[in-house]
Image (cartoon, rainbow, N blue to C red):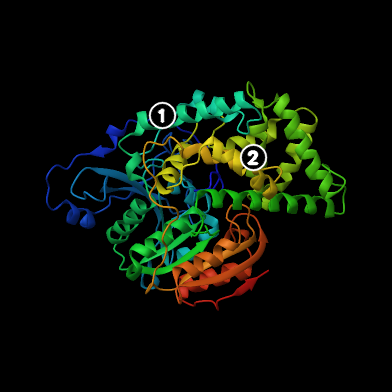
């Protein structure tokens, strides 16, 4: 999996959670697999988020005053042994706001990552999905290994502070050795703290959880809205259970034909495109661009800043300094959404004056760090799920051979994307495949929405996903816009197409373009 693939990373929190608290042995119960599909969920008011979910307050009431409800669903730890131990998966829902007779069922969301908590994400996007709520219960969940669902835990908060301050783009042998040693330490901590979960967090496992969820929620078909990595999860589900696909939408689409290296290279190109667009937008405004006189000047000044930070970091969020790595992460985070471009401009202005506060706050958001210094478990889950899914393993020598190609894709982001590939080199669990199988002959139509300006899941992936799903299944829609995803842009054409399919079953014409 591409190292930086995630949707709208949020500054949440994390702490160590003992695996024994979420594993419940079920012994030799021969009927457990049947009992799991028949389990009844106990929906209650949602608690405050756990440390692994990010902490903070319980979700605020919905716009109409209704309360969010949460429940725990049991699933097999090992889907190859469904009568064995179970884990608890955390769910959240908003009951349908429409008439009961108009209700279609549950619409299940996955907001990406891998490693993002759906339980904390869905309430934050409630306003965006009010129209869909008229005919669906809106449901999301923490996938296995994430948040409150048997979270993978690796390093503690102090160790993660150091991990994210390291030089992620080594310039010499000493820096390269340090990066490799830090990677091994991180991966060893994952194995030490989460050994029992690591073999069981593959996307195929999560897809089977989805089908169990469908049955427990009482739906004959899975109605699904997948975003970013959620499109890969949805594609794997469609491959495994094509006859169970209901109305499904994939937005910010992962390219299922690429392996880890190819995906990382595509992201380098995607974020470079987003940076180009940011620079052009800045200088095209009627007022003076605060961070450059021309688009090239904007990019040149950023490149100079990063080189200077490599030699001499500047004050960030006390007591931490803004390093080259943290600044790069902050810039990447801001490029996920056009709404964040103004903060990128402000952060660059500050940094040029010797103050790294805004860029470091953006970096913290990217890495799941809250203001009180605690991390959620999104980084650990991202590593665990990506390494369990992706078969290729890349060592330092291979990365060095491939650096020219990555630098050609992006002078600014190429090195970071290339060196990110070493994350799985010494992972304790073998990767499943070069890339996911999403072929789904016989499935209902799946609306596949690609954004031409998407940095994290480049536009070309939407066409490939539609092709791989199969003729008559993948229906491509193009949005000519900026940022990660299309529906959240509030573009009326996109939202009308998505709502028309999910609410009324109207499949848009393949090849529809929204501007």
Q: Residue at x 72, y 29 (%)?
A: 309
Q: Residue at x 35, y 42 (%)?
A: 149
| Closest to the observer, 24 or 105 | 24
Horizontal placement of 186 versus 370: left or right? left
Q: Position of residue 79 (x, y in %)?
A: 26, 50
Quadrant containing the C terminus in the rendered view:
bottom right
- Disc 1/disc 2 C-alpha distance (Å): 24 Å
| Closest to the observer, 10 or 188 | 188
Q: Position of residue 269 (x, y in %)?
A: 65, 52
Badge 1 or badge 2: first in the primary sequence: 1
Q: Is residue 200 visible?
A: yes
On the image, numbered disc 1 is attached to which residue? 188
**Element class at badge 2:** helix
**Element class at badge 1:** helix
Q: Position of residue 459 (x, y in %)?
A: 61, 61
Horizontal placement of 19 versus 431: left or right? left
* Location of residue 435 (image quadrant): bottom left
| Closest to the observer, 417 or 370 | 417
- The numbered mark at residue 415 is 2
Q: Residue at x 49, y 26 (%)?
A: 157
């Amino acid at each position: 999996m591409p190292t930086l693939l995630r949707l709208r990373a949020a500054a949440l929190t994390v702490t160590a959670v003992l695996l024994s608290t979420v594993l419940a042995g079920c012994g030799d119960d021969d009927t457990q697999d049947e009992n799991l599909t028949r389990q009844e969920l106990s929906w209650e008011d949602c608690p405050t988020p756990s440390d692994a979910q990010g902490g903070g307050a319980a979700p605020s009431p919905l716009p109409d005053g209704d309360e969010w409800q949460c429940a725990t669903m049991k699933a097999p730890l090992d889907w190859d042994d469904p009568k064995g131990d179970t884990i608890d998966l955390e769910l959240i829902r908003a009951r349908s706001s429409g008439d009961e007779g108009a209700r279609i069922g549950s619409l299940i969301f996955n907001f990406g990552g891998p490693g993002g908590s759906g339980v904390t994400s869905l309430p934050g996007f409630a306003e965006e999905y009010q129209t869909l709520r008229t005919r669906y219960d809106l449901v999301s969940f923490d996938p296995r290994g994430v948040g409150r669902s048997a979270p993978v835990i690796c390093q503690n908060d102090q160790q993660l502070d150091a991990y994210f301050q390291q030089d992620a783009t080594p310039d010499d042998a000493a820096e390269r050795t340090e990066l490799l040693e830090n990677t091994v330490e991180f991966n060893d901590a994952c194995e030490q703290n989460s050994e029992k979960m690591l073999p069981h967090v593959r996307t195929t496992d999560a897809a089977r959880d989805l089908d169990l969820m469908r049955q427990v929620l009482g739906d004959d078909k899975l109605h699904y809205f997948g975003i970013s990595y959620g499109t890969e999860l949805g594609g794997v589900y469609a491959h495994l259970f094509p006859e169970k696909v209901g109305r499904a939408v994939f937005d910010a689409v992962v390219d299922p034909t690429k392996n880890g290296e190819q995906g990382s290279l595509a992201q380098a190109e995607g974020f470079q495109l987003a940076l180009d667009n940011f620079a052009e937008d800045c200088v095209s405004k009627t007022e003076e661009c605060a961070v450059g006189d021309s688009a090239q000047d904007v990019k040149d000044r950023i490149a100079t800043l990063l080189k200077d930070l490599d030699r001499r970091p500047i004050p960030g969020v006390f007591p931490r300094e803004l390093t080259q790595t943290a600044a790069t992460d902050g810039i990447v985070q801001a490029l996920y959404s056009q709404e964040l471009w103004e903060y990128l401009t402000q952060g660059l202005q500050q940094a040029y004056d010797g103050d790294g506060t805004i860029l470091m706050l953006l970096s913290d958001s990217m890495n799941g760090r809250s203001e009180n210094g605690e991390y959620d478990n999104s980084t650990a889950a991202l590593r665990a799920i990506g390494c369990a899914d992706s078969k290729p393993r890349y060592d330092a020598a291979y990365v060095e051979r491939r650096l020219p190609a990555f630098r050609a894709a992006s002078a600014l982001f190429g090195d970071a994307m290339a060196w990110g590939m070493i994350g799985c080199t010494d992972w304790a669990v073998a990767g499943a495949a070069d890339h996911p199988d999403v072929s789904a002959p016989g499935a209902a139509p799946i609306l596949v929405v690609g954004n031409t300006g998407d940095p994290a899941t480049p536009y070309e992936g939407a066409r490939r996903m539609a092709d791989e799903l199969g003729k008559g299944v993948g229906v491509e829609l193009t949005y000519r816009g900026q940022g990660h995803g299309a529906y959240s842009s509030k573009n009326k054409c996109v939202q009308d197409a998505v709502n028309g399919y999910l609410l009324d079953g109207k499949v848009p014409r393949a090849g529809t373009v929204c501007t």
